[in-house]
Amino acid sequence: MRARRIGPLVLFGSLVSCGGDFQGGATPPDAFPEGASGDASDGAARDASAPSHACAEAGEASGGTTPLPLGLYTQCVASVVDSNLTAAGDATGALTLTESDGVLSVALGDGLFSISPGTLAFNALTSGAAVVAPGQSYGLLVVSCPTATAAAGALALDGNSLVVSILGQGCGSRVGGFIECPLPAQPTGALEGPDLCDDGDAGPQNFPVGTYAQCTGSIPGYGEGSVTLSESGGVWTAALAGVTGVSTLESSLALSPSSSSAALVAPGQMLSVQEFGWGPSCSGPPPNDSGLVDDPGPVTRTMTTDSGWLVVDGSTLFVFLGGTDECGTAVHESFNCIAQ
């Protein structure tokens, strides 16, 4: 099993459409933590001056992505973190994605260890990313509270995996839930993102700029570092600073916004990531003086992005980065940050 770093915590295991009755996934301004100012685009997002051109750009960005497969996902791993406990299981869970009348349904099945079976609705932003419809309740296991209510959340394609990240409230405490699943071998279809030009969405021109801090893979308030989104001459970038376990080799990551709330991370970019391994060698664990194999420890390697998303839900930025390291191992880095 590999470790997924969650702020100061470490979880062992391979961690977690416009229309219909759900409109957006905005986070209540005071849902997370003190200092969060509500909509991250306040004073930062720009007005659309050329909606038709922006829609064309958004369509082009979305057209270059792999659509999210619908159907049964197996070998999922899940985790839940609250203010007192961390619970994470092995890759034994399942979930099913379906779409009806523009609503993406995530049916949580058995085996997710810390998350009970149930269904959550998400609103698609593009063909590869969606945000949770807030206010829904979902069941918890192992941790101290039996239920939580979703306040913000996102799902996206992260390299060769589906990643679901949900932030909520349960029994008066903040709760973070995370699910990661390999893509299904036999999908039943693919998600079609909304047509941005139908509702006048100016697409990438409305993608927010500004700084998001307290970055963590679990719940806000336990993280560190920041992500700064900026735009210059139509070029969008994300600069990472002090985020636990991941940093860019260049000054920033290049982005391609495909809606006002989602941006694709351009493939082929280099990141420095912290994994568990046996030093720089890719050949496996060397024996020690006694002839036994030492346990793996933290090692820094270089990851090349295959695909990933930045998704804004109210005051929360969800970052999903997928790729491979120099040893050919799949790497997934997912975390969330709060608007400053």
Image (tube, rainbow, N blue to C red):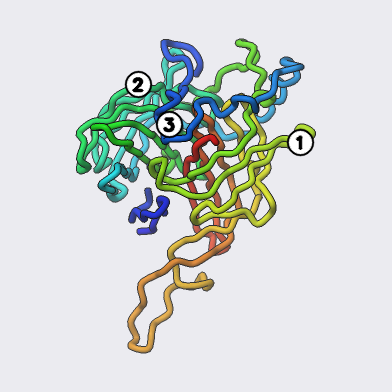
Q: Quadrant of the N terminus?
A: bottom left
Q: Quadrant of residue 293?
A: bottom left
* Residue 86 location (% of width, % of height): 28, 48
Of the two numbered discs 2 and 1 on the same chain, state the one appearing first in sequence.
Answer: 2
* Residue labelled with disc 1: 232
Query: In the depicted view, which residue is nearer to us: 255 or 1?
Result: 255
Is residue 16 left or right of 327 when viewed as pictured? left
| Residue visible at 49% across and 72% down in the picture | 279
Numbered label attached to residue 135: 2
Q: Earlier in the sequence, mark 3 or mark 1?
A: 3
Marks 3 and 2, how far apart at CA: 11 Å
Q: Secondary structure at mark 2?
A: loop
Q: Position of residue 207 (x, y in %)?
A: 63, 28
Residue type, label 2: Gly
Mark 2 → mark 1, Cα distance in angstroms: 36 Å
Tell me where residue 61 appears, x and y as whole percent: 66, 30
